[in-house]
Image: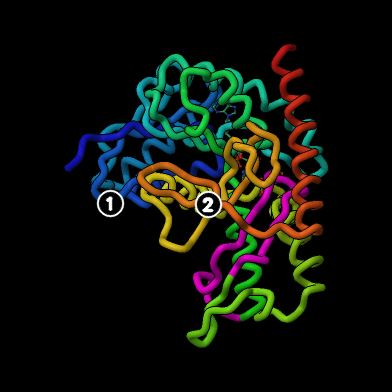
Amino acid sequence: MPEPIKVLVTGAAGQIAYSLLYSVAKGDVFGKDQPIILVLLDITPMMEVLKGVVMELQDCALPLVQEMIPTDKIEEAFKDIDAALLVGAMPRRDGMERKDLLAANVKIFQEQGKALDHYAKKTVKVVVVGNPANTNAFICSKFAPSIPKENFSALTRLDQNRAQAQIAGRLNVPNNAVKNCIIWGNHSSTQFPDVSHATVTKNGVVQPVAEAVKDDHWLNNEFIKTVQNRGAAVIKARKLSSAMSAAKAICDHMRDWWFGTHEGEWVSMAVPSDGSYEIEQDLMYSFPVNIKNGKYTIVQGLKIDDNAREKMNVTMKELKEEREMALAACQE
Ligand SMILES: NC(=O)c1ccc[n+]([C@@H]2O[C@H](COP(=O)([O-])OP(=O)(O)OC[C@H]3O[C@@H](n4cnc5c(N)ncnc54)[C@H](O)[C@@H]3O)[C@@H](O)[C@H]2O)c1
Ligand SMILES: O=C(O)CC[C@H](O)C(=O)O
């Protein structure tokens, strides 16, 4: 058995964590033979609820969980961690604007950035889930200057999974027959779900999604809008933010970062831009990436037409605006 790794989940008493913790604890993310020390951070008023979550995890009697550390102390939570799944933040409720969320949540990530800087291993891999996820990840990295900025990411895998499922549903094929859907930009309604490089395997034949769908109007309109607004649609229906699907996407994101992507396949992650595709450097922008040996590389050389360029710029502009608002909020 390898040495245990220390995995932090914040917002551990919340909705997403309730699905996420079970998957992490049973080895879906870091491997079926990787012992784990699970660190569970939430705020003081949630400690009683967290106690119940810990009892349930205990009662799962899972072999990989070597220790659980439930805490409301940030310095204890971030100490020597190998991976950070930063979920804890306020979710948007029906009728609430994203900007309300930004003001409320960005300070959490300023504080957690500082904690990462002081207490975490310098090799820690961080995925930010709490919204606005890209901008929170940007802030977190900014306040953790001793940790390489490549170690920070935000979750857009849920959007990728949504796009993949919409295409698979339309073509009546299994979800895993659809590959290489891309999410560009922000985890918000300005994101650009792009299937112009995606393929589908149907009746044993691999073909471009656009050829299989044979309906460019649907692909350029309804499909994009459905994916962009899926989170809001779930909130409207459930009166709560997506949780099961978010937890699944967090597992996909971190597992692929840990173990790598399959040959010829890419996944979408919001990562600091290196200037690829003319996206402003350091903006936490979602790109298609390949992953090998724990390191991602942005997929290069994809053809971007005028229509795509325009959509990629819209979501970049929103990210720049969010960044300015977040930096101002950090100074208050
Ligand atoms: N990026 C994505 O794809 C995606 C998808 C779904 C939800 N989200 C976001 O994830 C976040 C969590 O959603 P949820 O449904 O689990 O919400 P929730 O309200 O059920 O749980 C959030 C938990 O975070 C805790 N928390 C608040 N401040 C904290 C802090 N400073 N430190 C540690 N914990 C803290 C709360 O006490 C609560 O237990 C929201 O911001 C939501 O919008 C993102
Ligand atoms: O607040 C939102 O609009 C989205 C919530 C969440 O990020 C999701 O995508 O399901």
The residue most toward the left is: 1
Circle 2: residue type: Ala
Q: Residue at x 63, y 43 (%)?
A: 276
| SS at mark 2 in the image | helix
Instruction: Give how far across and how far down residue 226 sits, in percent.
Output: 75, 62
| SS at mark 1 in the image | loop
| Along the line of sight, the residue nearer the viewer: 208 or 237 | 208
Instruction: Give how far across and how far down residue 331 sits, in percent.
Output: 72, 12
Instruction: Give how far across and how far down residue 110 sits, in percent.
Output: 61, 20
Q: Which mark is residue 32?
A: 1
Q: Is residue 229 above or below residue 83?
A: below
Mark 1 lies within 8 Å of ligand 1 (Cβ measured): no
In which image quadrant can residue 59 be found?
top left
> Bounds of the magenta span?
172-198
Quarter of image, ligand 1: top right
In which image quadrant can residue 207 be found?
bottom right
Q: Residue at x 62, y 58 (%)?
A: 302
Circle 1: residue type: Lys
Mark 2 lies within 8 Å of ligand 1 (Cβ measured): yes
